[in-house]
Amino acid sequence: MVNEIRDLSSINDYRKIEIVKYLIQCKDRVAHESALFLHLKADSTKEKKSIKKAITRLVIDGCISFDKKKRIIKLKTNEFDVGEVILKGINQFAIQFKDKKESIKGKHLNGSYVGDTVLYSNKSKTIVGIINKKNNPTIFSCIGICDDIKLIPLSSPVEVDYNLRLDEKTKISGGLIISANLEYDKENDMYSCDLYEVIGRCSEENIMGKIVLAANGYDINFPKEVLEEAELMPDRVYESDIEGRVDLRNLKAFTLDCAKRMNTYDDALSIDITPDGNYMVYVHIVDVPHYVKPGMAMWEEARKRAEKIFMNNYRYARNMLPEKLSHGICSFLKGQDRLSKTISLEFDPEGNFIACDFFNSAINVRDNICTRDADRVYEAGYDSSKEYYNQEFIRDFILLKQVHKFIKKSSYIEGSDSSSDSMHTVLKDIIEFANEQVANYFPTLPFIYKTFRYPTKSEIEKRVFELSKKKTQFANNFNYVKRNIIDTVLNYYRLPHTDIYKYAIADILSKECSIYSAKNKGHFKYGVQRYTHINSPVRSFPNLVNLSLSDMYNTEFDPTPEAMERLEEKLERYCSEFNATNEKIEKLEHSLSNSKESEREINDYTHGVVTNRKGNRVSVNLPDGEMFRAYCSDSSVQEGSEVIIQINRSPKEIEKFNAKILNYKNT
């Protein structure tokens, strides 16, 4: 018996883990021994004997029961659960189960990473096995020491050796944040890494947003072929490009945008009054389809980056197009000629909407204005003592406010007084009105519509319960499309037609039920029968597709039933991709918004030389001359040792020891 126990103790743990992983996924956590052999691909007698020993060990541990007569195995313990690794914050992880979420330290991930489905031990609070590997790259801080490259995983800065395999043409310098694919080399007990991409440096302002996206499987950099195509793009608009377009370069145009995103300007406005007193508003959208066309590598890459991602908490917006376009020829930069698609909106002096036109144009933007500054200019009026710039635009801002009143009067936008609305609201509502008019401009032709799905009864009941706890007034002022949809949902589920139920359905539809579709159901949030996005073609691929469709509809498109059917099928395939992407983004943003961890600096890893040692206190001199103190009990670290340190620059740590030695090398 003693010899048998000694043999069992030598069994690799992975056998036991594989058995538990299999049982936990079986119905009622019960399986036949033959099914287990088949699942583990145990063909030889030796392999089956090894599995039987692992079963015996699990029986002794009390984890499973085994009916020797029926050869039935049953998982008895509730110690194990299956969950998904999620990112809780920068370098903060958790396991998401069906009904709960539990934090886990990076050192207990045991080779798993964000997106992996794992087997979790409630007893040891560690991951004991990976059920499904998502293969998202692991994020490292890359440090140079003695001509070697040392990798420190941001998920867990522990003493593990990582061998970085590089292409001969690739050059890596120290101090970079990189992502790499890991493989475990059992023979040498070492992880080998293939470089996936260089994310940036830890000193970059937006590095945290890049790390969050990279850790969740989003590419930060563009492929080589896309960058090569971008380099072939022109830096300016030539006169030959303007031929066949309406030349609006003499019309005063300007961009309005939020300060935090003022690097790409993809829409602009102009406003004027005609001799007969009508108001003419021009909404200009940058003509990206003129440069990015189907079949190009840039088009396919933009498709992968389908929907815009604004990591507001981490100060990073992921680009859909290379900077050569998004910050250059496809951006309405001040004083630069640019190709545009223009929607003209005409209102009479009484505020009635008269007509819309949609055409290719060329414009030259006079200024790139921040909405906050536009509000200050409007509030200052014609007072010359106020030293705000862009005073020449005060007339345009006043006219825009008046047009905003017209739009509120004639459309879905609620309210009557627009004088108190910010310029951001004015801009948003005018562009949304323009989007609606473009959809009406092509009344029988398919676009990619932003529409909705119907909520479930449980979703409605849950939202009603949440709203009942709040002291909120529920105004019953839903417009035509909204009222139609809400009444339909209430009748279908046989729910009461009360204000709180109507408000709950409206709230769900406007926030959580948006989807893309080539089938037009109307736009619930705005309460219109037809609505299609054409603005932001630099940030959102569906909008780029719609602008490309408008070109096709104005030229060679053959509107036969067969052509329409083929086009709708293609657009539906696109929509399925976009909806899947949106779901992934919403899941990521939800996991981050639920994090209780506040935003903080990532750890700063660097290397230096020990210049002084007194007891357990050492002084480390960095290559740039900066000096740090650290605590080190390892007597092998002496003066002259090259060390890798983790720097904590918080004031509390500076009072004590502001660096931690992670690794050293004596020369």
Image: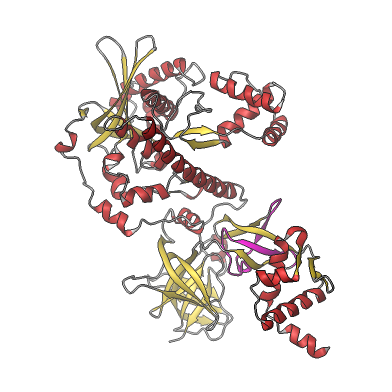
Residue 362 visible within the image = yes
**Residue 235 position within the rendered picture, expressed as x and y whole percent measured from the top left:** 21, 46
The residue lying toward the viewer, choosing from 122 and 459, is 459
Q: Is residue 205 left or right of residue 44?
A: left
Q: Is residue 31 left or right of residue 659?
A: right
- What residue is shown at x 61% (from left), y 50% (from top)? 595
Quadrant of the rendering where the N terminus is positioned: bottom right
Quadrant of the rendering where the C terminus is positioned: bottom left
Q: How is the image coloured?
A: secondary structure
View extreme (left): residue:
239
**Residue 192 position within the rendered picture, expressed as x and y whole percent measured from the top left:** 48, 75
Residue 534 visible within the image = no
**Residue 475 position within the rendered picture, expressed as x and y whole percent measured from the top left:** 63, 20
Indicate whether 420 appears above or below 99.
above
Q: Is residue 577 magenta?
A: no
Indicate whether 300 appears above or below 272.
below
- What residue is shown at x 32% (from left), y 52% (from top)? 297
Q: Is residue 546 left or right of residue 336?
A: right
* Image-quadrant location for residue 4: bottom right
What is the magenta range? 98-123
Indicate whether 265 appears above or below 480.
below
- What residue is shown at x 78% (from left), y 62% (from top)? 78
View extreme (bottom): residue:
3
The residue lying toward the viewer, choosing from 498 and 130, is 130
Number of residue marks = 0
**Residue 134 position within the rendered picture, expressed as x and y whole percent measured from the top left:** 54, 61
* Image-quadrant location for residue 150: bottom left
